[in-house]
Image: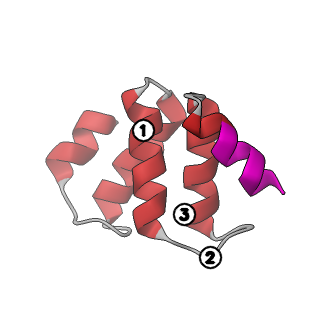
Amino acid sequence: MPLKWYTKAAESGNSRAMYRLGIMYYSGVGVQRDYNKAAEWLTKGANSGYTLSMNRLGYMHLKGKGIPVDYGVALKWF
């Protein structure tokens, strides 16, 4: 149920919902784990200025979770 509402809110531009969707896909809570979808939603949230999205996206680049390790990009988001 939360997936439906978070998706609806995120698609309407809600940056917190973008973050929550990213975390859901990252951790596999309520959805099948999908690092690509996590990175997609976290990038949208980060680009809208949501700091928690920026931090998690930096971590994903630092650790290579679903995306290539890139310290420069990680530093940008941190």
Q: Residues within 10 Å of mark 2 (few under 14, many from 20)?
A: few
List the single residue furthest toward the top.
49
The main secondary structure of the magenta stretch is: helix
x then y, percent, for residue 30: 75, 67
Q: Please give the name of the residue rendered at 35% of the width and 46% of the height, measured from the top-left corner.
A: 58
Q: Residues within 10 Å of mark 3 (few under 14, many from 20)?
A: many
Q: Nearer the viewer, residue 18 or 72?
A: 18
Q: Picture quarter containing residue 29?
A: bottom right
Task: Give the amino acid at mark 2.
Answer: Gln
43 drawn magenta: no
Position above or below: 46 against 37: above
Tell me whether circle 3 and circle 2 mark residues in contact (CB < 8 Å): no
Quote the CA–CA distance across marks 1 and 3. 14 Å
Tag 1 residue:
44
Compared across the picture, whether 77 is left or right of 49 comes to: left
Q: Please give the name of the residue rendered at 73% of the width and 55% of the height, measured from the top-left corner.
A: 3
Q: Which residues are magenta?
A: 1-8
Question: Could you say whether the residue bearing mark 2 is in a helix, strand or loop?
Answer: loop
Quote the CA–CA distance across marks 3 and 2. 9 Å
Tell me whether circle 1 and circle 3 mark residues in contact (CB < 8 Å): no
Tell me whether circle 1 and circle 2 mark residues in contact (CB < 8 Å): no
Tag 2 residue:
32
Tag 3 residue:
26
Q: Please give the name of the residue rendered at 32% of the width and 37% of the height, measured from the top-left corner.
A: 77
* Quarter of the image with the C terminus in it: top left
Position above or below: 15 against 18: above
Quote the CA–CA distance across marks 1 and 2. 20 Å
Point out the frontmost of discs 1 and 3.
1
Task: Give the amino acid at mark 3.
Answer: Tyr
Q: Picture quarter containing residue 65?
A: bottom left
Q: Nearer the viewer, residue 48 or 69?
A: 48
